[in-house]
Image (cartoon, grey):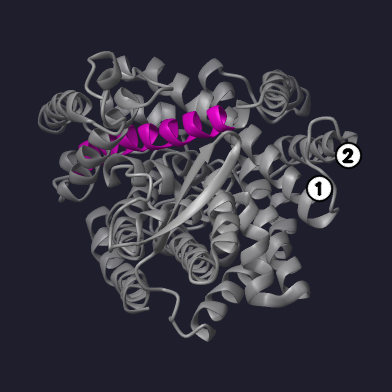
Amino acid sequence: MVYFVIGLVILVVGGLLYSKYVEKQFSPDDTRQTPATAKQDGVDFVPMKTWKNTLINLLNIAGTGPVLGPIQGILFGPIAFLTIPIGCVLAGAVHDYFNGMIATRNGGAQMPKIVTKYLGKGTRGIYLIFSSILLLLVGVVFVYTPGDLIVGDILKQPTAATNSVVWIVYALIFAYYVIATMFPIDKIIGRIYPVFGAFLIISAIGVLVGIFVDGGQHLGNLNGIILTTKDGVTTATQHAGGFVGHFRNLPFIPVFFITVACGILSGFHGSQTALISRTMEKESQGRTVFYGSMIMEGLIAMAWAGGAMVLFNRAALNEVGDALTAGAALTAGATGMVGNISRTFMGNIGGLLAIIGVIVLPITSGDTAFRALRLQFAERFGIDQKPIKNRVTVAIGLFIPAIAILIFAKTNANGFNILWRYFGWANQTLAVFALGMASVYLAVHKKNYWITFIPGLFYCFIVFAFILHADIGLNLDKLLGLTKDNPQVYTASYIVAAVITVLYGWFIWKRMHNTTEDLTHYEA
């Protein structure tokens, strides 16, 4: 409980104090005309109040990442209660704030255009490809996960691909995405999100209250479960967990940061803050809308991480059969823990509301993921998005490959696992671009660029160490014969990732100190 409370204090107090310093580095100016007023078109550029922008941005960025990620991340031990808030305050919220504010200063431009402006034309194609793939994967993942929660936890039916109800629910979610993607932002998203927000707040508060009611007796070092399978039979043995250490010996760096992802830092957020940069009435809203939303997402992550640890330890302290159930749920599919946590802390009715809240999270991120993807393509190819026929044309072109990916993920035995792992890695990789872009912006304006440069270096090492070692990547250590006795040896991956990080730092440093053009004005 001590680590959990310290983490909450870091998140709330640290966020309040550090956000003021971060805001000072940007120096918002309310005498400037924001894109929402300068380019008002009734579709994407629409002035909205601070509370509405904050709520929409929170629901945009808070998908299943801050729920499923921390549930799995807590398997590394109580260290998660400190790394989540520290990372959120120093990296994630900073990333979101500068993305949103720099987009505001650049006329509401989408991230590919802004990254190109500050990092050079050579990055344009690479970033656009990564960003488009990520947004497409986000949209698909956020049809799959809420759809399965609706079918499994609400309708109490099997979520197998052979169940026609699953596909009907998927189709309904896609139908909502089509409507939300094409219609003006204040007509659909601006009106329905306050209702969704109520469910989100209820679920997070309910789990947090449940953790404190538990009294912290199950928030100590994780009583780990080692799962072994022989001849088709899975057994569980217990071991006393430490402050840090995964029961499958996965290394904290880089796996923890890829696993938790959205609860700490998310490149996907850049596409969403760019959307909200088009609806802010004045620049001073940014601290609450961008930085504050990420702190709230950190609270969501802490709530579900704490809830998972309580349930996991309760099971582990009972009998091996219960431990096996908890361990299997956590390792085979974190979505299985969502319902357990909700009903344990809030009862059947409250648990249902909490599950609805978790269903709402991905749906309210999936719709704006497709919206951001539509705007990126329209911006890149100069397609006017005011005529509805243009929006329909671009949207249809995006939904066709999304449906194909969804069918593959659902019908392939390991399809979703592959999808989720690529999504997690691409998510953090995009953040490295955005942090580098923000560093150049701050350097050009003679501000403290270290607040984005250091997180950028750290996450550059994380994403490359992961993809170099992973079987969905280069599998480098295995190819070199270093994993014969231990599959978690990262020796070669760490070395190569360190070299790439130095090269990344050198590139950003050059851009920071060699960019002399005037970047203080709005981009036309």
Mark 1 lies on a secondary structure that is helix
Corner quadrant of residue 199? bottom right
Mark 2 lies on a secondary structure that is helix
x and y, in percent, of residue 499 in the image: 13, 24
Disc 2 vs disc 1: Cβ atoms closer than 8 Å? yes
State whether residue 271 is above or below residue 26. Answer: above
Name the kind of residue labelled 1 in the image.
Answer: Val
Corner quadrant of residue 7? bottom left
x and y, in percent, of residue 53 in the image: 56, 58
Image quadrant for the N terminus? bottom left
State whether residue 7 is above or below residue 76. Answer: below
Label 1 sits on residue: 151
Question: Which residues, given as a range, are shown in magenta?
Answer: 417-442
Q: Residue at x 18, y 29 (%)?
A: 491
Quick check: is 430 in the magenta stretch? yes
Image quadrant for the C terminus? top left
Q: Main secondary structure of the magenta part?
A: helix
Q: Quick check: can you spot residue 209?
A: yes
Quick check: is 234 in the magenta stretch? no
Q: Residue at x 31, y 76 (%)?
A: 6
x and y, in percent, of residue 63 in the image: 57, 49
Nearest to N terminus: mark 2 or mark 1: 1
Q: CA distance from mark 2 to mark 1?
A: 7 Å
The circle drawn on residue 165 is: 2
Pointer 2: residues within 10 angstroms few (<14), some, or many (20+)?
some
Q: Nearer the viewer, residue 279 or 220?
A: 220
Name the kind of residue labelled 2 in the image.
Answer: Val
